[in-house]
Structure formats: structure tokens, C-alpha cells
């Protein structure tokens, strides 16, 4: 768990409203044409892990062997040499996946802080991979507005803002950098948030700064997270996901200096 992400989330405080007539709330949404009960996408990194029913999950591609149905699975491929990536992309695409994602968070684990191989990607590389995929291509682990622009220009469909790549740089937490990334490319590419969450209130915080959905790194059941998100929506007078905005939170950036 990235402690700085949790600490940053805590600084975005929800403002309760009690004078309203919101009784029932709806967390329903659609991603990639799939109906979801909540804007929550579990991150699965271990082979054999139980998948949440009816959820859209991001799964480490190495843990997919033996899986039959991939209709609600987005394989997550680590950045690698193009010669290694291209056949993997084509093989996975042939299995009818709704989308494919490239994981850049592991680039933080390169020497001297780890043993991963340094394999970044250019705009041209991304465009080539998107053409080979034949399905939507996402980037998982975007930490800067400039990278978001490159992804957009390469014709990708979505990015997941995640602080992992900047861990050893002591870079900003996901929720701290998210508004700037969102303002830079919103409307031209889908922008999701990713990282550790403790509960549905944390998910609400990401939605309030603009995330269209959240890729959650947690072992907690999706139904529990959804119930807590619904609770936060009722107490902030947000009847639908479209009602969740900056107005529902109190953050340091809004304090008078």
C-alpha cells in the first residue's frame, strides 16, 4: 500500500449535507459498453484469485492462463520490448477481450531500486500497439499531464492515473496529480484513477476530482465498497454519479490563504 496516497486522500474531506430530498442513489454506469453496478474496477494480480461477479476487472496478463471467458477482463501487460509485446497483444486480442492495458507502474522498480528492465514507450510505439490490439488500449500508471497528452495523441482510449511510477521520486499522490491530468485531456480520452483505497468514501473522493471510475487495489468485496459509496452519496446529496463534483469536498486547495 502506498501510504502517501492514503494520506493525500484523507486531506480531501467530504462535506455532509442534510437539508435535501435525496433518499435513493444510483451508482450504475457503463464502461466499454458493459453495464456496471458501480464505477469500481478491481485490480487482480494473483493467479487463481476469485473475480468479482459482473465487475470489469484489470488482471495481470500472466495470471490469465487457463481462464476461459474474458468478456469482463482487461489484461494488464507490463511494459517490455516491442518484439515481446506485439505477439502478446495480438494473442490476447484474439480472445475477445473488451480492452487491453499497459502497466507502467513497474518502471519504478528499475535499478538501483529494483530489478525490472527499463522499457518506456514512445508515441509511435503506442500507436503501433493500438493498431495491433484491434481493441481499446489503456495505459495504467500515468503520473503526468504531458504523458496523458502523448497517450491521447497516440490514439489510445483511456488512461489510469496512478502514482506508482513516481514512488521512489517521492512524486505526488494519485489524487494530488489527478485534477491537472484531468483538466489537460478530459473529453478527449477517458480518465480513471487507480491506487489503494480503504473504503467507498475514498472512491467518492476520486470521483469528486473528476475520475470516471476507480481501479481499486484492495481485498475488500465490491459490494461493501459500493454500499459505502452509496452512503457517501446520500450524505452529500449526490443522487447520481453525475452529481459528484468538487462541491462535495473540502480540500487544501480551496482554503483561503
Image: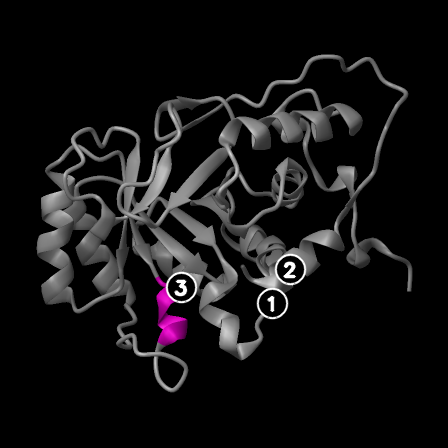
Q: Splitting the image into 4 quarters, where does residue 173 fall?
A: bottom right
The residue carrying mark 1 is 172
Q: Which mark is residue 37?
A: none
Q: Residues within 10 Å of mark 2 (few under 14, many from 20)?
A: some
CB under 8 Å between discs 3 and 1: no
Give the residue at x 53% y 78%. 169
Give the residue at x 62% y 25%. 227
The residue carrying mark 3 is 105
Q: Residues within 10 Å of mark 3 (few under 14, many from 20)?
A: many
Rendering colour mode: one colour
State whether residue 214 is above or below residue 22.
Answer: below
The quarter of the image holding the C terminus is bottom right
Magenta-tinted stretch? 104-109
State whether residue 61 is above or below residue 144.
Answer: above
Left or right: 65 in relation to 111:
left
Q: Is residue 152 visible?
A: no
Percent from the top left, x then y, of residue 78? 27, 60
Q: Closer to us: mark 3 or mark 2?
A: 3
Q: Is residue 9 magenta?
A: no
Percent from the top left, x then y, of residue 63? 24, 48
Q: Is residue 107 magenta?
A: yes
Q: Which mark is residue 176?
A: 2
Q: Is residue 48 visible?
A: yes
Helix or strand or loop: what does disc 2 sit on?
A: helix
CB under 8 Å between discs 1 and 2: yes
Helix or strand or loop: what does disc 1 sit on?
A: loop
Helix or strand or loop: what does disc 3 sit on?
A: helix
Give the alpha-carbon distance from disc 1 to disc 2, as whole Å: 6 Å
The quarter of the image holding the N terminus is bottom right
Front position in the image: 38 or 86:
38
Amino acid at each position: 500500500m502506498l501510504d502517501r496516497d492514503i494520506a493525500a486522500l484523507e486531506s480531501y474531506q467530504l462535506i455532509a449535507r442534510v437539508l435535501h430530498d435525496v433518499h435513493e442513489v444510483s451508482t450504475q454506469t457503463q464502461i466499454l459498453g458493459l453495464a456496471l453496478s458501480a464505477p469500481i474496477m478491481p485490480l487482480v494480480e494473483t493467479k487463481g484469485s476469485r473475480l468479482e461477479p459482473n465487475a470489469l476487472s484489470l488482471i495481470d496478463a500472466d495470471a490469465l492462463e487457463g481462464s476461459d471467458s474474458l468478456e469482463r477482463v482487461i489484461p494488464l501487460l507490463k511494459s517490455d520490448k516491442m518484439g515481446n509485446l506485439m505477439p502478446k497483444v495480438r494473442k490476447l486480442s484474439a480472445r475477445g477481450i473488451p480492452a487491453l492495458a499497459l502497466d507502467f507502474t513497474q518502471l519504478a522498480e528499475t535499478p538501483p531500486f529494483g530489478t525490472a528492465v527499463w522499457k518506456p514507450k514512445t508515441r509511435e510505439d503506442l500507436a503501433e500497439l493500438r493498431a495491433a490490439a484491434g481493441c481499446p488500449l489503456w495505459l495504467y500508471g500515468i503520473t503526468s499531464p504531458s504523458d496523458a497528452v502523448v497517450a491521447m495523441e497516440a490514439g489510445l482510449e483511456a488512461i489510469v492515473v496512478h502514482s506508482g511510477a513516481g514512488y521512489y521520486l517521492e512524486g505526488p499522490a494519485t489524487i494530488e496529480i489527478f485534477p491537472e491530468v484531468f483538466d489537460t485531456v478530459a473529453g478527449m480520452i477517458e480518465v480513471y484513477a487507480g491506487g489503494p483505497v480503504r473504503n467507498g468514501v475514498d472512491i467518492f473522493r476520486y470521483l469528486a476530482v473528476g475520475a470516471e471510475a476507480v481501479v481499486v487495489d484492495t481485498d475488500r468485496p465490491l459490494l461493501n465498497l459500493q454500499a459505502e459509496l452509496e452512503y457517501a452519496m446520500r450524505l452529500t446529496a449526490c443522487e447520481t454519479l453525475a452529481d459528484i463534483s468538487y462541491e462535495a469536498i473540502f480540500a487544501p486547495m480551496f482554503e483561503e490563504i
